[in-house]
């Protein structure tokens, strides 16, 4: 082994400096003593520049393709003969597919690697969204939404786990917030874009322009999938733009402590299912998703009021809540990372969202409703981002690889229930107000869970 005093030496076939070798020795010392070395900010910024553009764009399109049905629903009910309850079932069919394929999808990710798995998922869901524009009956719509949920099932948990191999713990929530900006950005551009597409492709007396909307928004995902296949490395050790010491340092600083992706075993799944912490996180995320999924699906229809009837106007109005949400999740993630209070910030966000939803369901003035929905949207996205700071830290190690998809699957039980419940309430009462209040009830339960189990969710 060459000494650090020599000017240069070879490591794994690469010429590195003596200073780099000294850092490598410190890294081995820290690993042998159970410590995780801190990673320089310059290195994490370089990692972010290489990984986050493709991941962020894919996440944006993922969210856009998942919920563009909310704008298509402005015409889809008339075009396909859907009742409000039928439209709610379309949302729940997505959740059924998502739920059934959650764990199998994550096993696929662990077996074939991040690059191929994430790229194929993007190509798959983009193709299904395009084909959804061809459906002619409610049953065909249900099948298409089920297939979309099945393909998208592995995306979010795979991203959470993938980033845990690349970024140190102190940057985890901020990193999630960067790619999670795809959610509010999708809302900011998705509304006006959907309104514009449905307007320019509309014909007098027809309600079929939603088909062009789905095709125009599904095709870009196929291109992003090809981008991921061409550029994304599976692990730090596969990145050509990292030296071996840098790759080793990133791996050891991870929550998974450099564990390579390995197939998940049945014993690991059973171990995670027996963990009380996993079940507490499952209940919390069930309430979180139950309070947010339905409202996102129904938001354009809820905002349709006298003077705000056309798709183009609704598109621009719906961008307002997402604009404020974009800033809110950045602030919440930075505060959570600095204080390590993921559960506390999530609980505050849940209380704010629950209160705003409950009030929005009873007030009449359209501008006041818009203001309350803005507060609720910003709070619910802050809640989602800070919540996902908990599972990798509270679980850690191999249990995180199994626990994260189980938690995400539990959340989509809420996604299965809430759209149907809101559709049934809207059909029974002739208004979405009761459904908005229901979202507030779900999020109030989420806040209670976060507060009641704060000790179990505390991070060292």
Image (cartoon, helix red, strand yellow):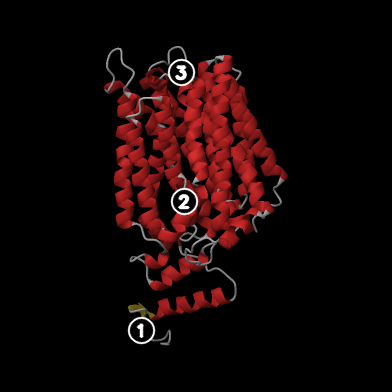
Quarter of the image where the N terminus is located = bottom left
Q: Residues within 10 Å of mark 3 (few under 14, many from 20)?
A: some
Tag 1 near tag 3, CB within 8 Å: no
Dot 2 falls on a residue whose secondary structure is: helix
Point 51% across, 55% down: residue: 171
Instruction: Tell me if 73 is positioned left or right of 386 in this view.
Output: left
* Of callouts 1 and 3, the N-terminal one: 1
Point 40% across, 33% down: residue: 188
User: Residue 435 location in percent, x, y?
Assistant: 58, 24
Of marks 2 and 1, the one in the foreground: 2
Instruction: Tell me if 303 is positioned left or right of 223 in this view.
Output: right
Q: Which residue is mark 1?
A: 7
- Residue toward you, 452 or 170: 452
* Of callouts 2 and 1, the N-terminal one: 1
Instruction: Tell me if 387 is positioned left or right of 175 in this view.
Output: right
Number of the label disc, if any, that sits on residue 105: 2
Can you say whether 58 is above or below 80 in the image? below
How much space separates mark 1 and mark 3, taking CA atoms? 70 Å
Can you say whether 19 is above or below 206 in the image? below
Dot 1 falls on a residue whose secondary structure is: loop
Q: Residues within 10 Å of mark 1 (few under 14, many from 20)?
A: few
Can you say whether 22 is above or below 246 in the image? below
Of marks 2 and 3, the one in the foreground: 2
């Amino acid at each position: 082994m060459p000494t650090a005093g020599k000017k240069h030496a070879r490591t794994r076939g690469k010429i590195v400096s003596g200073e780099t070798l000294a850092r490598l020795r410190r890294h081995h010392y820290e690993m042998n003593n159970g410590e995780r070395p801190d990673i320089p900010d310059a290195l994490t910024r370089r990692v972010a520049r290489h990984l986050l553009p493709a991941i962020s764009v894919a996440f944006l399109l993922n969210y856009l393709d998942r919920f563009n049905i909310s704008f298509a629903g402005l015409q889809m009910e008339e075009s396909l003969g859907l009742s409000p309850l039928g439209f709610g079932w379309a949302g729940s069919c997505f959740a059924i597919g998502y739920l059934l394929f959650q764990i199998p999808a994550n096993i696929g990710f662990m077996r074939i690697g991040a690059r191929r798995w994430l790229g194929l998922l993007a190509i798959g869901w983009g193709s299904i969204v395009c084909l959804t524009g061809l459906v002619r009956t409610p049953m065909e719509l249900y099948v298409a939404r089920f297939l979309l949920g099945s393909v998208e099932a592995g995306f979010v948990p795979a991203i959470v786990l993938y980033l845990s191999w690349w970024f140190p713990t102190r940057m985890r929530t901020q990193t999630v917030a960067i790619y999670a900006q795809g959610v509010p950005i999708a809302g900011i551009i998705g509304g006006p874009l959907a309104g514009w597409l449905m307007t320019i492709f509309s014909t007098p007396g027809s309600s079929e322009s939603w088909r062009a909307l789905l095709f125009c928004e599904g095709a870009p995902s196929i291109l992003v999938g090809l981008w991921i296949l061409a550029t994304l490395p599976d692990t730090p050790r596969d990145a050509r733009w990292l030296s071996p010491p840098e790759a080793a340092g990133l791996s050891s600083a991870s929550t998974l402590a450099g564990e390579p992706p390995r197939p998940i075993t049945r014993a690991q799944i059973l171990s995670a299912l027996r963990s009380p912490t996993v079940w507490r996180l499952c209940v919390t995320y069930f309430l979180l998703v139950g309070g947010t999924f339905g409202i996102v699906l129904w938001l354009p229809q809820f905002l349709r009021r006298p003077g705000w009837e056309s798709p183009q106007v609704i598109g621009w109005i719906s961008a307002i809540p997402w604009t404020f949400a974009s800033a809110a999740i950045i602030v919440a993630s930075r505060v959570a990372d600095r204080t390590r209070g993921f559960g506390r910030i999530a609980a505050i966000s849940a209380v704010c969202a629950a209160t705003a939803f409950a009030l929005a369901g009873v007030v009449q003035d359209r501008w006041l409703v818009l203001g309350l929905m803005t507060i609720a949207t910003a709070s619910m996205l802050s809640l989602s981002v800070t919540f996902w700071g908990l599972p990798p830290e509270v679980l850690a190690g191999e249990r995180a690889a199994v626990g994260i998809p189980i938690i995400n699957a539990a959340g989509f039980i809420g996604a299965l229930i809430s759209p149907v419940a809101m559709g049934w309430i809207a059909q029974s009462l002739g208004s979405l107000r009761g459904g908005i209040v229901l979202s507030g009830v779900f999020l109030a339960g989420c806040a209670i869970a976060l507060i009641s189990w704060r000790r179990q969710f505390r991070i060292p």
